[in-house]
Amino acid sequence: MNNKELLKIAEDARKYSHSPYSNFKVGAALLSKDNKVYTGCNIECASLGGTNCAERTAIFKAISDGTSDIEAIAIASDNSEKNEPTYPCGICRQVIIEFGTDIRIITGYSEGEIQECRIKDLIPNYFTGSDFRETK
């Protein structure tokens, strides 16, 4: 699957956003290394701490389905059609890097400019579970 196709799926997932407080709809499409796609949207609630981002929704769906080998995550927001990229927030960056430092992050607009980077480029000086393990 190419970046444009994955971003289009993220754009479609955005339609299901529950964002009555920010009015900012975000969709995500996760591509696993075995070519399965998991979608997510942002889900807000009145207790803002209970809000979940689109990227984490897609990741949690994949993990709960037994898939943890993530190849890429495409992100689309209300800004996408203006060719303004939307990148993962800090919490999402930390959750994404938990599953690999080379996961591709794709953002932009499927009918316009598309940008790609690696999660390790968005979260410098990152830490992962390996930082908690003893080295011998």
Image (cartoon, rainbow, N blue to C red):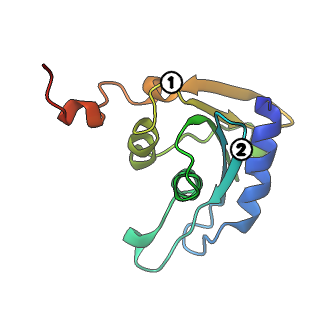
Dot 2 or dot 1: first in sequence order is 2
- For the residues marked 2 and 1, what is the alpha-carbon distance in whole angstroms? 18 Å
Identify the disc placed on residue 102: 1
Relative placement, left or right, of 1 versus 130 is right
List x then y, in percent, for residue 46: 46, 80
> Is residue 9 placed above or below 4 in the rendered structure?
below
- Image position, residue 111 (x, y; %): 87, 36
**Which quadrant would the C terminus be assigned to in this image?**
top left
Q: Is residue 22 above or below residue 62?
A: below
Residue 88 horizontal/vertical position (percent): 51, 43
Instruction: Give the vertical position of 39 relative to 44 (above or below).
Output: above
Task: Name the outermost residue toward the right.
Answer: 111
Evaluate whether residue 57 shows in this view. yes
In what element is the residue under mark 1?
Answer: loop
Residue 3, by quadrant, is: top right
The amino acid at mark 2 is: Lys
Most foreground residue, 9 or 88: 9
Viewer-side residue, 42 vs 19:
42
Residue 2 located left or right of residue 71? right
Q: Is residue 5 left or right of residue 94?
A: right
Please state, as top left, top right, bottom left or bottom right, where the N terminus lies in the image. Answer: top right
Q: Residue furthest top?
A: 136
Tally the marks.
2
Q: Nearer the viewer, residue 31 or 73?
A: 31
Label 2 element class = loop
Residue 31 is tagged as none
The amino acid pointed to by label 1 is: Asp
The residue located at (64%, 33%) in the rendering is 33
Q: Quarter-wise, where is residue 58 in the image?
A: bottom right
Residue designated by label 2: 36
In the rendered image, which quarter is residue 12 located in? bottom right
Closest to the camera, between mark 2 and mark 1, is 2
